[in-house]
Amino acid sequence: MLIFRSEDTVQAWCAARGLPQRPIINLDQLWQLAVTWYANRLTVESRRPAPEEMVGIFEAVGLKGPFWDPKSDAWSSAS
Amino acid sequence: MDFDTTVKLCIFQTIADTTRVPTADDVASILGASRQDVVQALHNLHRKRLLVPEPDDPARIRMAPPFSGIETPFVVRIGEKTHFANCVWDALGIPAALHADGVVETADAQTGEPMRIEVRERGPLPQPCAIHFAVPAARWWEDIVYT
């Protein structure tokens, strides 16, 4: 994922590459994901969340739907 | 504690202390273990998606998320130390992992405009920005370096 100053520059980036625009999140949402993923990275217990857990983590910050489901098969033939 | 966990902790503590992502030889030297055992542990940790070895060298680490083994456009300054992150998510993940204030120096991916994100205990200071996910979650690990 990449960071942009605004949605306008996201649109320009996608258009320049012929790519569809996909979900955009804000800095607060990204921080919540970063803390959930990495706050215990230097501990014995640290691990990557399981796919089933990831759906709940994304929903907790307002990100729902197949795009955020690591087990979704909706993207098997689409890019 | 199993050996994979010992290697994992050694890797991440070494990065936290030195900013440098260690090789299998470094880890073997620190732990007094064999290189072969450490390379196997790196393989196991990759399967757990806790790191990514270099494609052509299983003894070197390309990514130990949130840290990058190579320089990237996501520079994270924690005190006097400089780390590199794999993406903007990981850039915020470094101060989160180290439980420290930090500054992320990066740029708008389209315009190249420099962007500076100050991160405090409660999170990043607000500023206009948009984080775009081009790849759906189900495909992140098909090419994690691109993602």
Image (spheres, grey):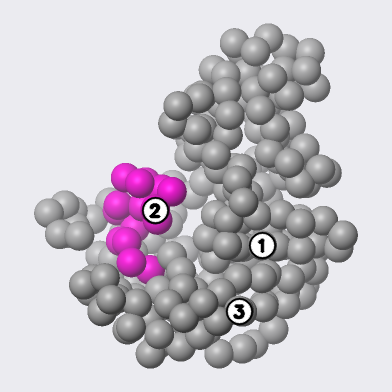
Q: Is tag 2's residue or tag 3's residue first in the polypeptide sequence?
A: 3
Residue, far right: B80
In the image, residue B139 lies in the stretch drawn in magenta? yes
Q: Residue furthest left?
A: A77
Q: Which of the 4 image quarters holds residue B128?
A: bottom right
How far is disc 1 from disc 3 in space, using C-alphas? Answer: 11 Å
Q: Chain of mark 2?
A: B
Label disc, if present, on residue B63 of the rendered structure: none
Looking at the image, which residue is at 55% across and 39% down? B62
Q: Nearer the viewer, residue A2 or A54?
A: A2
* Amino acid marked by disc 2: Tyr
In the rendering, at what x and y percent does residue B78 appear?
A: 80, 62
Q: What residue does disc 1 label? A: B75
Sequence-wise, the earlier of marks 1 and 3 is 1
Upstream in sequence: badge 1 or badge 2: 1
- Callout 2 and callout 3 share a chain: yes
Residue B59: percent from the left, percent from the top? Answer: 57, 23
Quadrant (top left, top right, bottom left, bottom right) of the C terminus of chain B: bottom left
Q: Which residues are magenta?
A: B133-147
Instruction: Please give the name of the residue rendered at 16% of the width and 52% of the height, measured from the top-left corner.
Output: A76
Q: Report x, y in % for residue B22.
A: 70, 32
What kind of element bears circle 1?
strand
What label sits on residue B114 in the rendered view?
Answer: 3
Q: On the image, which quarter does residue B41 sit in?
A: top right
Residue B31 is a magenta residue: no
Q: Which mark is residue B146?
A: 2
